[in-house]
Amino acid sequence: MLSRSCCMFSTTYESFPWSLSAYSLSQTSSASTAASGTVLSFGRRGERVVFMAVSSNRARQRKLPKNLRNPRRPKLPPDMDYSFKRVLYEEDEEASQKPTIGTFSDDDEGVACEASSDGIDEELEVEVEKGRMCDDGEIIWESDEMEAISSLFRGRIPQKPGKLDRERPLPLPLPYKIRPLGLPTPKRFANHSRQSISKQVYKNPTFLIGLAKEIQGLSTEENISKVLSKWSPFLRKGSLSLTIRELGYLGLPERALETFCWVKKQPHLFPDDHILASTIEVLAGSNELKVPFDLEKFTGLASRSVYEAMLRGYIKGGSLKLALKLLSMAKESNRVLDTGVYAKLILELGKDPDKSSLLLVLLEELAVREDLNLIPQDCTAIMKICIRLGRFDIVEGLYDWFRESGGNPSVVMYTTMIHCRYSANKYREALAMLWEMEASNCLFDLPTYRVVIKLFVALNDLSRAVRYFSKLKEAGFCPTFDIYCSLIKIYMASGRVAKCKDICKEAEMAGFRFDEHTMLKLQQ
C-alpha cells in the first residue's frame, strides 16, 4: 500500500536497452535525492523496473496495527502461472509521456498519493497468452474469448424468473411469546383404563343394550332388580333410557315399565325426563299407555321432550287420531314442537289417500315455520308423498329450501326430483337435473337408472337410453321388468323389430315372461 510519503511506479522500456535506462535513472535519482531528502531504490523484476520513493520523515507514517505487525502466519505467495507472461502494453503516445523521478512535481506526487490512498496498489498489467502475438505486435483473440470479454460490458446477466408470488416467511416467535404460562394443560389422550367403572359404563351403548338383553333372558317370575341392582352404583341419570328403548324394540313394554318403576326407587337416578320420555314412547308405541279423560290437564304439565315422545309413540303405534289431538292441543296452547314430529305424522297420513286434506293442512303449517329443520330422509319422504298427490310445486320448494340451507342432495333426492319433473311432463327440466346429478359425481343406483331410462324413452332418445342401459349392466345391476318394457317400447317406436326380439330373449333368460296382452300393449 502506498501512503502520502511513498510512491511506486512501474514501467517497461521495450525500445531502450537496460544499461541506458539504468544509467539515466541513477543520475536522476541522485539529483532528486539531494533535493527532496528522500532515499530512492530501484530494482528489476523480469521485464519490469520498479521505482519507489520513500520519505525520510517517519513521523507522518501511521503505526501498523498489531495484527499486521505480528501476523499469525505469513501470507501464502500466489500460484505461479507459467502459461502466461505479464507485460504492460502501452500505446506509442503514452510511451512518449512516461514519467520520471526527476520530472515529478508536487502536484503529481499529490495525485499519485491520492490514488494510492484509494487502495489502488496493484500494478497495471495485461495477460497475453504465449504465441498469441502477430508479427505486427497485435494480439489475436479467439471468438469465444471475445464473446466472454464483451459480455462483461453488457450489464447485468438476466436471471431465471423465480417464484413471483412467493410469500415472505413469518418471523420466528420470540421466546417470551412461546414461553408457557405455567398453568396445567388438560390431557388430550385420556387413559380409559384408569377411569372409574362408572365413567366406563354409564353411557356405553354396548353395555346398556347388553342390560336389555340380560333382562330379556330373565324368566317371567324373576324381577329385573336381579340384573340392575348390581350395576346401580355405576349408573347415572339418563343411563337407562337407551335400555328402555331397546326393550321396546324387543317387544317387552312390560319390562320397560318395570325398569322405570325400579328407577323411581333410586334417588340418584330419578327424577329424569329422558327415562320418562323413553318409557312413554315405548308404551304409546305398543298401545299400552292408558289415556286419561282429562288429557289436557295431564299433558299441560309435561315438558317438551315428554310431549314429543308421546306424540311419536302414538304415530308409531298407528293411533293417528290421538296424535292429531295432541297436535291440535299443542297449537292451542302455543307449544312449539319439533318439525321432525310433523314430518313423521305426514308420512303416516300419506299412506291413506283419504286423508289428503289433513295432509295438505299439515304441509301448510310446516311451510310457515321459520325454524324448519328436516333431515334429508324426512325431506325426501315428504317429496314422494307430494308427487303422489300431484303437488309438484311443494316438491320444488322443498328442494330449493334444502339447497339454500346448505344441504348436499343424495342420490335418493336427485332421483326423486327427476321423477317429479318426469311426472309433471317437464322432460327438459328433468334432463337438466340429470346433468346436475352427474356433475356432482353422484353414483347411480338401480331406481335412478329406471327413472333415467324412462325419461329418455319419453324424449324418444334411443341412443342415450341404450347407453344408460349398458351403464346399468356395467355397474353390476340386473335390469327389472319395467326397464325391459321401456327398451322394447322405444325399439318398437323406432322400427327395430330385431332388437325387440333380442331384448325379449334376454328378459326371458333373466326369468321374465311377456304375455300376449303385454306384447300387444308394447306394439301400440
Image: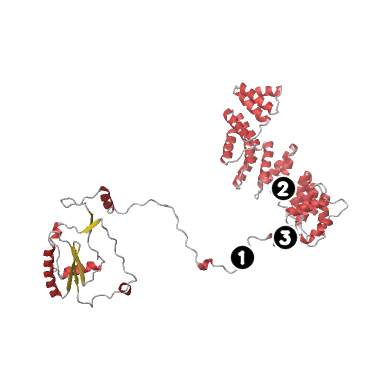
Q: Which label sits on residue 491? A: none
Question: Could you say which is closer to the camera, residue 424 or residue 41?
Answer: 41
Element at label 2:
helix
Residue on which disc 3 sits: 199
Q: Is residue 437 above or below residue 91?
A: above
> In the drawing, does residue 510 fall left or right of residue 252?
left
Residue on which disc 1 sits: 185
Answer with the quarter of the image where residue 451 lies.
Answer: top right
Foreground tag (1 vs 2): 1
Q: Is residue 86 above or below residue 363?
A: below
Of labels 3 and 1, earlier in sequence is 1
> In the drawing, does residue 220 fall left or right of residue 472?
right
Question: Could you say which is closer to the camera, residue 267 or residue 6?
Answer: 6
Question: Disc 3, disc 1: CB below 8 Å?
Answer: no
Of labels 2 and 3, earlier in sequence is 3
Q: Are there few (<14), some (14-19), or many (20+) residues within 10 Å of tag 3? A: few
Residue 386: horizontal and vertical position, in percent?
68, 39
Distance from label 3 to label 1 (Cα)?
21 Å
Answer with the quarter of the image where residue 63 lies.
Answer: bottom left
Q: Which label sits on residue 341? A: 2
Question: Disc 2, disc 3: CB below 8 Å?
Answer: no
**Residue 524: in sight, yes or no?**
no
User: Which residue of the protein is positioned furthest toward the right in this rendering?
Assistant: 221
> In the drawing, does residue 105 fall left or right of residue 462?
left
